[in-house]
Amino acid sequence: MSTPHTLSFRFAGFGGQGVLLMGMMVSYAGMEEGKHVTWLPSYGAEMRGGTANCTVVVSDKPIASPVIQNPDVAVVMNEPSLAKFEPLVRKGGTLFINSSLVTGKSNRSDIRVVYIPATDAANELGTTKVANMVMLGAVVGDSGVVSVKTLHASLLPVMGMDKQKLEALNIAAMERGVALLKG
Amino acid sequence: MGKVLMKGNEALAEAAIRAGVDGFFAYPITPQNEVGEYLSLHLPEAGGVFVQAESELGAINMVFGAAAAGKRAMTSSSGPGISLKQEGISTLAGAEMPCVIVNMTRGGPGLGNIAPAQSDYFQATKGGGHGDYHCIVLAPSTIQELVDFMFEAFPLAEKWRLPVMILGDGALGQMMEPVDFRGRERLADSRKQPEWALTGAKGRKPHLVKSLFLHGDDLYHFNLRQQEKWEKIQAEEPKLELVAMEDADYAIAAFGSMGRIAGSVIDLARAEGIKLGLIRPLTLWPFPNKAIAELVGDGTLLQRILTVEMNLGQMVEDVRLAVNGKIPVDFFGSPGGRVPMPEEVLAELHKIIG
């Protein structure tokens, strides 16, 4: 059950798009802000190009179930994920769609739908690899689950301190996501 | 350093190091591979021994060897691998060798799948291997609890000279949660040399570690001593968590990952005005019979228990034995590595209570 103090997320896309990392970033940032968090991956015989998704819960109170039937927020990075997760978003929840790769639209009128051209924005920044960070900036900027500042600070602890060279690019991608949200 | 965000498997491995494990003997299997991966890197750094064995049989017998030498020995696997270790587990119990065995359960029987399951409850609590024996079985629900139980496991195994099994599942192993290791540094082993330890017998009588009692009534007496030990364990060690049971008309009984998912069912039901509580055994053997029996004694409110498991009905038998027919005990199971959603469990509860 969702209360104002608990937010649940489902991040979904192709393996290799970094959807598990998006969830880890939110989880780490939530922990840094003193919240309770759970990160549950769908795991299996998955591979690059297959599908991947994870469920994240961020709460002010201890989290009972890490499995969530109807998340408050679903983030779909590719077409197959739209069909799979659009119906599951909680009534009144939010669906983020990577409109660069997902041509379909949501027909639901009981949820809010946010279209973010994450892959195009990433390509403009020089690499398609940061599409997840563009989307993450939008999701965090919109939901306010953690501050964007904490999100930035979570990048290296999650990705590894040896990724310092990539920090500026990833932060630029997150900022681009926040900007796209404002239109 | 405050809390750290870790996968269950890695948190367990880190806890094992800090709890003072001397030797970890591994053979890989999904979904617990990160346990061995982590220990292969970090246990040698901490002064312990990591061996990737040639098979599960090799791994469990290395545990036997290390335990016989008085060391803190551990292994980890999942369903099919735990089945292969059963001969060794029975031997460890027969020789009264303390050790820690982890089962991050996956779907079964046979090779099954790699998804989270609880279908090894019978195997863990009712023997698994041959002969009259029990392992002490701990069932954590969260990653912090997994870590906390890891710290309790060796002292418990040494107190009772029995293998301790931590029964997790794929979800607990693969998910991430913040854990707190503060104040829990790895300490030098301050134990005296265990009285059974095989150390070369210089200047003393040889010790004997064995599970073979061919002579006369030796085995009969050994078995009776085990029975006395079990009675003490059953009196001293059962643990359970009760949530919202004070005014509960109904309860869900569940362990491990299902136990925490059930926590959300309690919230959903209470929001509808259904007075639902949670009975969550933390030790599966010894099973908390007495504490559960007290919930259904004279003048208690509880009318019905729904046992929910990620299997086809295993712990429910122990719940029924504890309740002893005083109230109905129903069952809802989700087998095959399919983790049930809180809403599904609530729907099942509605069916039962009308």
Image: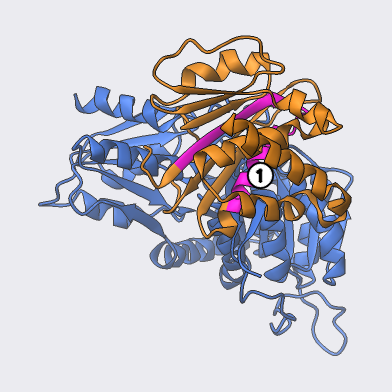
Where residue B7 appears, as percent x and y from the top left, is 67, 49
Mark 1 crowdedness (10 Å alpha carbons): few <14, some 14-19, many ≥20: many
Residue at 41% in and 15% down: A109
Residue at the image position 66 percent from the left and 44 percent from the top: A24
Estimate the x, y position of residue B202 in percent, counting from the top left.
88, 86
| Vertical comparison of B21 with B333: above or below | below
Does the image show residue B91?
A: no
Identity of the residue furthest to the bottom in this view: B203
- Where does the magenta region start and end? A7-29
Give the secondary structure at mark 1.
helix
Tell me the residue at 73%/59% (across/down): B74
**Amino acid type for the residue under numbered disc 1:** Met
- Figure disc tally: 1
Residue identifier under label 1: A24
In magenta stretch: residue B56: no
Location of residue A164 (image quadrant)? bottom right
Residue B349, position in %: x, y?
A: 29, 29
Q: In this structure image, what is the colour of chain B?
A: blue
Specify whether B53 is left or right of A1: right
Q: Quadrant of residue A124?
A: top right
